Image: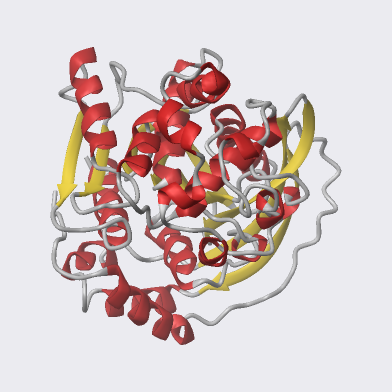
Amino acid sequence: MILLHKKTSTYSLVILMALSIFIIPSCTKDNNDDPIVYSTYVSHELLVTYSSDGIKTLFQQVQLLHPEVEVLIQQLQYDVGVYNVTYNTPFNGEEIEASGLVCIPVTDNEAFPMISFQNGTNTAHAEAPTVDYANTLFKYLESSASMGYIMLIPDYIGFGKSEQFVHPYLHTESTVSTVENLIIATKEMLNSGIVNTKWNNDVYLMGYSQGGWATLASHRYLTNKTDLSFSVAASSCGAGPYNLSTVQNFMFEGDTYPQPVYMAYTGVSYSSLGLITNPLTDYFKEPYATPLPSYFDGTLSNGEINQLLNDTVSVLVTDSFLTGINTDPLYQNFRSAMSMNSVSGWNSEQPIHLYHGTADNYVPPTTTEDVFQEFVDAGASEKVSYFPLQNMNHTTAAIPMVVNSLIWFNELENK
């Protein structure tokens, strides 16, 4: 296993953005005239096709900053079709339509494993995977299908096809259902012969930040299902807020917190879901509390919402919330919601890799350290490994985590 400690994500982004010219899209649409009735799959649209030569050029340029990528380049061989797939999933007691990217190697009836990648915190509809699929980092993930994977990237509820809903941020039930049902919809799409690619029924899960939490929660849920028609082969989780109480306390312990959008997002989400019933003014001070829900209507990005809030904790958060979050009966529902939507370690039978930047000041490394210890205590020490990414913060650790995860998945597949 090779760990990367040299370069920053900022430089990587510059390189990746410069590379978009090397992958030439084909923006045609498919006909969806298939008369088959599906349980989960609804429709699909071909967004773009990437050539294997263009993909190799992309990865070769990334290799300038991350030499370890050479191992991945050796696996690149297929053109990739990127689809926007609409599918059914339950939410708040009803069946709704959600969406996600499905990236498929262009082949003639070869069978491949699947990777479901869960992305980090996003507030803007324009930055959803199915909308912003040409974004350089999404393009890099999409192109990874060229190694012989069916790559999935769910939008999450609240984005793409389901953008009329408030995103249920850090809500376990809706998140894992979204992941599971995109997998099932993709299976139905492949089994129907819509494309000439097959799935071997193995799934790898991968995600970072909110996506790290979503990945671990999905892994635990899916492996506990007795009627699952596929198997989780392994998971790789980066910088996830696994214990939400730990993260909340970390946000409050300093004078400032650099991502107040995270604090507000949880409050708005849990209020919208009915998990907390007291007004947001019990949590946030004015002039911030009243307009908070309007900030999460999908028109603003994380950074734009941060500009509307305040990173001084005592200015943004009420005194009663700061002092009573762990004990005051006023916040019992909030504590219950955090507990219900946290994910802890278990005696996993499948391998799991955990990553976290040691200099992360958004999501504390203790969340990963603690969940790793829970895995060890549960008897999973031979299956679960923790890789601290030395001196990396929440931003700079993301690309090394993804690169190392793909290398590891390839190693598992080639055993």
Task: Judge left or right: residue 192 versus residue 234.
Answer: right
247 or 178: nearer the viewer: 247
Observer-nearest residue: 16 or 40?
Answer: 16
Residue at 56% x, 21% y is 330
User: In the picture provided, is 81 more to the left or to the right than 366?
Assistant: right
- State which quadrant residue 211 falls in: top left
Question: Residue at 63% of width from left, 39% of height from top?
Answer: 281
Q: In the displayed structure, would residue 385 be above or below residue 392?
A: above
- Asked whether residue 228 appears in the rendered view, the answer is no
Specify the quadrant of the image occupied by residue 245: top left
Q: In the rendered view, does 315 fall on the left or right side of 7?
A: right
- The one nearer the camera, 180 or 188, is 180
In this rendering, the count of numbered labels is 0
Q: Residue 91, position in %: x, y? A: 72, 31
Residue 401, above or below 241: below
Q: Position of residue 217 (x, y in %)?
A: 44, 29
Residue ID at (86%, 43%): 35
Across and down, in percent, residue 162 comes to 74, 48
Q: Quadrant of the C terminus?
A: top left
- Is residue 208 found left or right of 64 in the rendered image? right
Q: By what rule are the colours in the image chosen?
A: secondary structure
Residue 131 shows in the view: yes
> Which image quarter: residue 243?
top left
* Residue 254, horizontal then vertical, whole percent: 30, 47
Query: Front-most of 41 and 267?
Result: 267
